[in-house]
Image: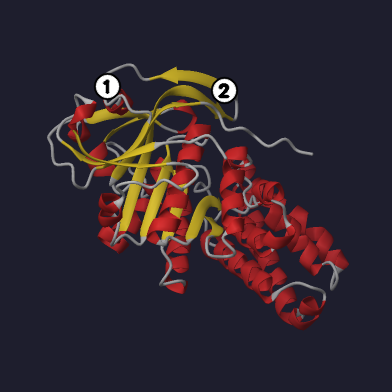
Amino acid sequence: MNKILTFIIALSFCSCNAQTDFNSTIEFSSDLENFENILALKEALQSVEIIALGENTHGLGEVFKAKTELVKFLHQELGFDLVLFESGYGDGALAWERLDSLSTKEFTNVFSSNFYYHSEEIESLVGYAKSQNGKLKIQGFDCQPQQNYLIKRMSEVVLPVDPIFSKKVSLEMRSFNNLYQYENGKDTLAFYNQRDRFIGFISEYDKLLDKNTSELLQYGTTKSEINALKKSNEIFVSTYSKVNFGEMMSWPTSANIRDKASFEIVKWFKENNPKSKIIIWAQNSHIENKTKPNYNVNWMGHNLKKTFGDKYYSIGAIVYSGKNLNNNGTFDFEHNDSEYFAYHLNQFQKEKFVFDLRKHNKQDFTNQLLLGMESNGNTAEFIAKDRFDGLLFIKYSDIPTLIRKE
């Protein structure tokens, strides 16, 4: 049995000065055998249909562990059955269709092109999902075409019916990245030529699927895989067919385009699975309810809150100290400064807990403009009660344990 990992879920408390101020606590363990006093948590989330679990950066392994345990809890105790990762739609959908033939390690390494998620912490969640016999599904909601497994499967699927076209897939899909280069180099003509070439290739791929559906099914491609490929292509066309020069890299336009598409994908999942209760797994900014002061990005969470109201519940992650992983390596951090939210949450002297901001009405640090660490160690000012419905606090986190490529 794995070492017991205990969470304290704080649904309400009187002040921010001492741990004895907790009025209600909920404890549960990583083996999911010893749930205690969970009625308050279940009551708080009873009407919630979409819950978003944030991560202040992608490079904190203990955050992944905590979120994995929360997913298990939400699945077993509240019936949540669909996890949408900040990963490409195509990667997630096509990997899921091959779940039975992929090991947990293989699935973890292909369902997302985000290398942070190729970790033992995420593999633990994948193993749990596989053990649920389809009752807990993992998918992706990102619109970006740089999806390794998607590109691999796009090529493999059409190989039996058109080997020459199959060889073009990787080149045409990878060439999407040229849009960034042309924009950076101020080459307008090359930009629009590349955009139209990419969209034209996607259209050609769809026509090949439609023309050869019966034959593809005979070769072993499933109807669900064909539908996933066509939905993925639909996402690319709707997101990028009219993208203009200057919008791929400019801020906030590039983020607005991506998060508008991500919102539409999440909404599509909900509309096509109306009885499903959805868990979103993403970075804090994507799931926030309201923009941070002096920011003008329209993040996915803003539209989710407007559309679903109280049925949408966002939980932002706050970490006091540890070691973070990013593209340039690792760095240590500790927020032993009252200007940080982590400092105030650390005063409760708890290793991990979830703070319900909806029921917390005190005029304290949750209503103050304070700092939080964001992606790659950057900081941002925000008012916690405005930005999220709840907070996941973790006292210390090391980097994720990345899975070695065999």
| The furthest residue to the top | 336
- The percent coordinates of residue 203 (x first, y second) are 66, 70
Q: Is residue 64 or residue 286 the one in the foreground?
A: 64
For numbered disc 2, what is the local secondary structure?
strand
Residue annotated with mark 1: 339
Eyeballing the image, is 372 above or below 124?
above
Kindly tell me whether residue 60 is visible in this rendering.
no
Which label sits on residue 156? none
Tell which circle, 1 or 2, labels the residue nearer the N-terminal end: 2
In which quadrant will I find the N terminus?
Answer: top right
**Type of the residue with mark 1:** Glu
For numbered disc 1, what is the local secondary structure?
loop
**Type of the residue with mark 2:** Thr
- The percent coordinates of residue 332 (x first, y second) are 49, 18
- The percent coordinates of residue 85 (x first, y second) are 52, 51
Q: Quadrant of residue 384?
A: top left
Eyeballing the image, is 24 above or below 341?
below
Q: Is residue 3 or residue 292 the one in the foreground?
A: 3
Q: Is residue 180 or residue 120 the one in the foreground?
A: 120
Residue sitting at 62 percent across and 54 percent down?
145
Badge 2 crowding class, 10 Å Cα cut-off, few under 14, some 14 to 19, many 20 or more, is some
Eyeballing the image, is 185 above or below 263?
above
Residue sitting at 49 percent across and 29 percent down?
376
Residue annotated with mark 2: 330
Kindly tell me whether residue 34 is visible in this rendering.
yes
Residue sitting at 56 percent across and 60 percent down?
132
